Amino acid sequence: MRKNIVAGNWKMNKSLQEGIELAKGLNEALAGETQNCDVVICTPYIHLASVTPLVDAAKIGVGAENCANKESGAYTGEISASMIASTGAKYVILGHSERRAYYHETAELLAEKVKLALANGLTPIFCIGEVLEEREAEKQNEVVYAQLAGSLFDLSVEDFSKIILAYEPVWAIGTGKTASAAQAQEIHSYIRSVVADKFGKEVAENTSILYGGSCKASNAKELFSNLDVDGGLIGGAALKVADFKGIIDAFNK
Ligand code: PGA
């Protein structure tokens, strides 16, 4: 069966010291509790080596927010998938809409990153989602199909099975607007059908598809109660222990 997952995306927030405090706080908040979902925190690169040994690996997975599309070498300022793995981190967010929009990451480039992440034992959390104009033109299915096909359709069934998907409508990210539960279910179910057509029904049933975009404690339960919504990728509400814990608890109550 597929896993329920609540993953935090800290984006470009928190000094090293603040990040350590946040990770410690979350670790304490989850200690002694039974969780009904996997919990992941994706932090800026510089936090990874400090945060990974601080948290209970049985309860909290750690990930990066990006990785390079090259293995190693003369790529000043880049961080490779193998460097991320060497910190003990297990996950990497790839294809976030902010990377696509502000850093011009293309489907081809993302396909390279996904392959390197997998080759280094990292689990990609691969983001897809449409912008407002595309939603208004009812093109959301076409958009997510192209994003999946462009970066993931070359993978073997075995490799695809290691991927977590995150549907994040760009119009909902950081805006306070959330997709309705019905909108989320509709497109998550479509995404699962695309995966089933390409990689088979069993793989599709086992793929976790997270929702992202202004997800918070007050709406998480309603979103996660949908059949095809297997958790969330959380930005703003991942920056405070109580807010993030409130979302994790959506699976408990
Ligand atoms: P948000 O961000 O929860 O702040 O909307 C989600 C994301 O970008 O992953």
Image (spheres, rainbow, N blue to C red):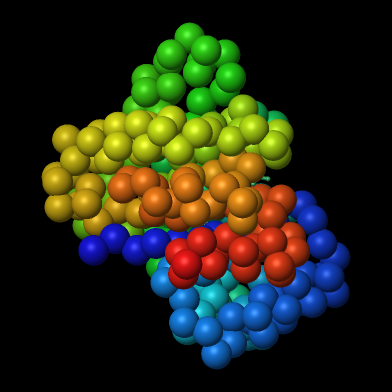
* Quadrant location, ligand no. 1: top right
Quadrant where the N terminus is found in the figure? bottom left
**Residue 189: x percent and y percent?**
30, 37
Q: Is residue 213 left or right of residue 154?
A: right
Tally the marks.
Answer: 0
**Residue 109: x percent and y percent?**
50, 37
Please give the name of the residue rendered at 53% of the width and 33% of the height, measured from the top-left corner.
179
Q: Could you say which is closer to the camera, residue 109 or residue 31? A: 31
Q: Does residue 130 show up?
A: yes
Q: Is residue 77 left or right of residue 224?
A: right
State the residue lying farthest toward the bottom: 32
Please give the name of the residue rendered at 29% of the width and 60% of the height, measured from the top-left corner.
2
**Residue 167: x percent and y percent?**
46, 40
Q: Does residue 86 show up?
A: no
| Residue 217 vertical position relative to residue 229 in the rendered view, above or below | below
State the residue lying farthest toward the top: 137
**Residue 14: x percent and y percent?**
82, 62
Please give the name of the residue rendered at 67% of the width and 76% of the height, measured from the top-left corner.
26
Q: Is residue 128 left or right of residue 55?
A: left
State the residue lying farthest toward the front: 253
Q: Could you say which is closer to the camera, residue 17 or residue 192? A: 192
Q: Is residue 156 left or right of residue 123?
A: left
Please give the name of the residue rendered at 69% of the width and 61% of the height, measured from the top-left corner.
243
Q: Could you say which is closer to the camera, residue 90 or residue 215? A: 215
